[in-house]
Amino acid sequence: MNALKSVFNFLGRFLTSTRIVVTNLITFIFLALVFIGLISVFIPNDRSIDKEGKVVILNPEGVLVDQEVQYSDFQFSLGQVEQIQTRDLIKLIQSISKDEDIPAVLVDFSGLSYSGPTNLIEISEEIQKLSELKRVIAFSDRYTTSSYLIAAHADEIYIHQAGGFDIQGIGGYRSYNKSLYENLKMKVYNYSQGDYKSAVEGLTRDSMSDFDKNKGRLFMILYGVSTKKSLPKQEVFRKKRSKNLQIHISMPLVKPLSTT
């Protein structure tokens, strides 16, 4: 009986000691956090960035979209790609325009893999407004029709020494394989609804329909007019400068291109 009583006495003393230690530890941690918080309030913390002689680098990487898409909504996925909403990029450009401490902006759209025509025009217009307030420097590994539309508003345009131009203008390519599938004894089932569904014409026709021709022609005209309006007055890109890039072309650019 005395042995059992001793065991309970020991357990009681152990639990009491443990409770005191845990309570004191929690109290110490709480007081330490309060003390650190008070110090951080009264001690000045200078996190200002020295902007003298520096530029902001605007280099979005991913796909420019109107609305971000959740990949969980799709049954099949080819891999997750970084998506950049157009409105978010526009807000960023506008915030840079309003910052009086930013002297210049380096625009590098080399990492932008795809962007639709309307998105490009919107971003191009914002870069144009930015160039009226800041010095804009454009750089790219290579210039395509899309990246050139944006870079055209820059004060200076640079390209990688191993880069090049791939400016094809407004257009597109499509194959029509109806006869091919028939020869291969393959049958295409079209489950689309509506009178005009040109998305499947490559599978169900051997040539472009009149409706798709008219729609494409109208789109090209409207897009071409909008693109031309968004481009500033341009200087001719001289042949002697193009030799530095090992190409022989003549195209409009805002400023003479440098390879350095």
Image (cartoon, rainbow, N blue to C red):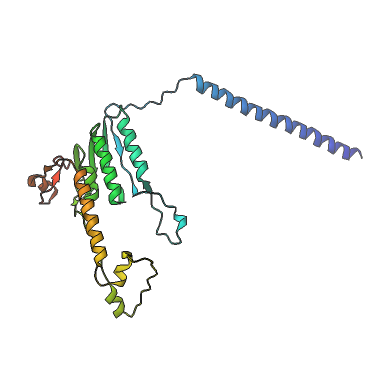
Number of numbered discs present?
0
Task: Using the image as rendered, state which of residue 60 and residue 84 is in the foreground.
Answer: 84
Task: Using the image as rendered, state which of residue 20 and residue 56 is in the foreground.
Answer: 56
Q: Residue at left 26%, top 60%?
A: 215
Q: Residue at left 77%, top 32%?
A: 16
Report if residue 150 is visible in the image.
Answer: yes
For this orientation, the residue located farthest to the front is 195
For this orientation, the residue located farthest to the left is 240
Report if residue 173 is visible in the image.
Answer: no
Answer with the quarter of the image where residue 87 lies: top left
Q: Quadrant where the N terminus lies? A: top right
* Whole-percent x, y for residue 6 in the image: 86, 36
* Whole-percent x, y for residue 135 in the image: 23, 33
* Whole-percent x, y for residue 130 in the image: 26, 35
Above-or-below relation of 103 to 90: above
Instruction: Using residue 78 as the reference point, say whether residue 248 is left or right of it.
Output: left
Above-or-below relation of 253 to 38: below
Q: Residue at left 27%, top 51%?
A: 117
Above-or-below relation of 239 to 37: below
